[in-house]
């Protein structure tokens, strides 16, 4: 049995800079420009210049590569780069790469970024299949796409339906997740839904996209970018902003996770569990903390049901009780676990997990637009499917 | 037909499923070493370490595991509404396959389902599932 003894990174690194672009439906800018703007903002926030950055970590689904960004903003001494995937599973794992690079001496200040023109460019919610013959070559798409199973939303709809079958979960319960995120977005001027309140009636009246998921169960297609700068906790003391110490990071998968990007998870014997439980076990062990120690959480919310499943699998409530847990206001400000305090993917913007890390840092700094009083420990999860990653931030 | 999406039916790992469908059979990959179900189909058995497997035909009977009614169209070849079903094979519980139904029929979890076979092209047949009639 492997131990974590050789991976003792607890509180050894910190996020010292955060940066975001505006979030919109049409940025009018290239992917590279979005990445550069978020990166420059994060580097400036850290009190550094591009010349101080010697490492870059990207997401595997980004179109911007390390050297693209380095060239563009003037990072001329890049000694480390890395990428993590798949997609939204990556961001906390990307921070883990930065921590590993710093602790092993491969880099001293690492830029971690994600950008996408997710509305005006490639839209993940539309089928990308435009050839007549689909699948093969290890994709396993041939077992799914021909039946009209074509998007992540449809996968999570089938999962949500099964959760309703097994546990009696109700649409009105899923609604609480959408409404909570929307209320946080209404307080956040950067959020795409800042000016758009949402009522239970509007949620239930909205059109069905893929039953049982309605319009507001889906995240926002967003143009935008987020970036953060990671350095050693020692060096963080010299940076202008309060350090958000990286208490611990973890990646994880589950037994028999199934291959492929997303559809084969429907072949798992149980589809109502995510790999979050495995990630949680590893992360809490590395952090020396548990669910009761979390003051505020940024929970990956590509869809409302994704949040519900994670609340259960992270141990914030019992399996099957996610519905009553959210309907009881536990994820609201003042609840036992305030979540997605910037509005999340559902109502701030979908920067594929990176905006959750930025908001997590804001909570540790005390600068969130929905600040949780006295928040000192923030969980950030990227545990949709097939595998997952997560981290815990802590005030210094 | 077909202006529908047609599966690659000769993939080295999954082609046997579609070869069986041409014979109007539902075939699942099994391990010859320990009889483990290898689904989705893979060449190696993680249970016993064998690389020796077979395609085994099963009865075209299943129960309904879950489903979604797609009402927002994402592909021109798939007009809405339609229903994607996930079924659980009677002979191999825990083994799931997909099917597509027109429209939004009334469904209930656990109801019996039967296989049928849809000719997509001259050489590709898609295994399908629908509520057991009668």
Image (cartoon, coloured by chain):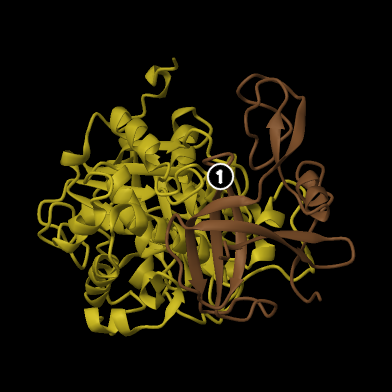
Host chain of mark 1: B
- Of residue A16 and residue A384, the one placed in the foreground of this image is A384
Crowd band around label 1 with a 10 angstrom C-alpha radius: few (<14), some (14–19), many (20+): some
Q: Residue at x 35, y 38 (%)?
A: A277
Quadrant where the N terminus of chain A sits is top left
Residue A217's place in the image compared with A142, above or below, is below
Q: Is residue B14 left or right of residue B100?
A: right
- Of residue A370 and residue B61, the one placed in the foreground of this image is B61
Chain displayed in yellow: A
Q: Residue at x 61, y 57 (%)?
A: B114
Residue A210 screen position, x and y as percent: 47, 72
Residue A147 screen position, x and y as percent: 65, 65
Residue A338 sits in which quadrant? bottom left
Residue B66 visible within the image = yes
Which residue, given by chain and number where applicable, does mark 1 sit on? B90
- Residue that protrudes farthest toward the top in the picture: A1
- Residue that protrudes farthest toward the right in the picture: B122
Chain displayed in brown: B
Q: Is residue A384 left or right of residue A359?
A: right
């Amino acid at each position: 049995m492997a131990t974590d003894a050789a991976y003792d990174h607890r509180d050894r690194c910190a996020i010292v800079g955060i940066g975001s672009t505006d979030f919109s439906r049409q940025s009018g800018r290239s992917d590279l420009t979005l990445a550069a703007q978020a990166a420059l903002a994060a580097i400036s926030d850290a009190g550094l210049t591009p010349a101080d950055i010697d490492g870059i970590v990207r997401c595997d689904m980004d179109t911007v590569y390390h050297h693209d960004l380095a060239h563009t903003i003037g990072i001329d001494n890049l000694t480390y780069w890395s990428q993590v995937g798949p997609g939204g599973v990556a961001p906390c794992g990307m921070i883990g790469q930065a921590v590993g690079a710093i602790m092993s001496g491969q880099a001293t200040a690492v830029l971690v970024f994600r950008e996408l023109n997710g509305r005006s460019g490639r839209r993940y919610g539309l089928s990308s299949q435009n050839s007549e013959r689909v699948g093969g070559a290890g994709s396993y798409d041939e077992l799914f796409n021909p039946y009209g199973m074509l998007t992540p939303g449809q996968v999570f709809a089938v999962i949500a339906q099964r959760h309703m079958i097994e546990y009696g979960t109700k649409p009105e319960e899923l609604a609480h997740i959408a409404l909570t995120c929307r209320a946080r977005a209404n307080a956040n001027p950067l959020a795409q839904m800042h000016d758009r309140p949402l009522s239970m009636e509007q949620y239930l009246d909205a059109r069905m996209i893929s039953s049982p998921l309605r319009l507001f169960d889906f995240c926002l297609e967003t143009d935008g970018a987020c970036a953060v700068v990671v350095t050693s906790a020692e060096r963080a003391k010299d940076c202008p902003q309060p350090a958000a110490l990286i208490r611990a990071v973890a990646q994880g998968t589950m037994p028999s996770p199934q291959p492929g990007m997303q559809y084969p998870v429907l072949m798992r014997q149980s589809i109502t569990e995510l790999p979050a439980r495995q990630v949680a076990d590893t992360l809490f062990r590395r952090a020396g903390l548990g669910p009761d120690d979390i003051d505020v959480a940024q929970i990956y919310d590509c869809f409302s049901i994704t949040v519900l499943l994670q609340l259960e699998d992270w141990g914030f409530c019992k399996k099957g009780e996610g519905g009553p847990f959210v309907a009881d206001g536990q994820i609201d400000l003042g609840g036992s676990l305030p979540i997605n305090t910037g509005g999340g993917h559902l109502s701030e913007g979908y920067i594929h997990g990176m905006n959750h890390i930025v908001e997590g840092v804001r909570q540790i700094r005390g600068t969130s637009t929905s600040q949780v009083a006295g928040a000192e420990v923030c969980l950030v999860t990227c545990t949709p499917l097939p595998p997952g990653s997560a981290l815990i931030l802590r005030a210094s | 037909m077909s202006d529908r999406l047609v599966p690659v039916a000769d993939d080295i790992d999954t082609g046997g499923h579609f070869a069986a469908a041409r014979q109007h059979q539902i075939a699942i990959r099994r391990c010859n070493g320990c009889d483990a179900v290898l689904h989705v189909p893979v060449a190696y058995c993680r249970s016993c370490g064998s690389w020796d497997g077979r395609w085994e035909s099963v009865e075209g009977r299943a129960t309904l595991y879950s489903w979604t009614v797609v009402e927002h169209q994402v592909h021109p070849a798939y007009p809405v509404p339609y229903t994607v079903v996930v079924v659980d094979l009677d002979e191999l519980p825990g083994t799931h396959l997909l099917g597509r139904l027109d429209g939004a029929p009334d469904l209930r979890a656990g109801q019996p389902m039967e296989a049928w076979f849809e000719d997509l092209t001259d050489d590709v047949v898609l295994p399908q599932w629908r509520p057991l009639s009668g």
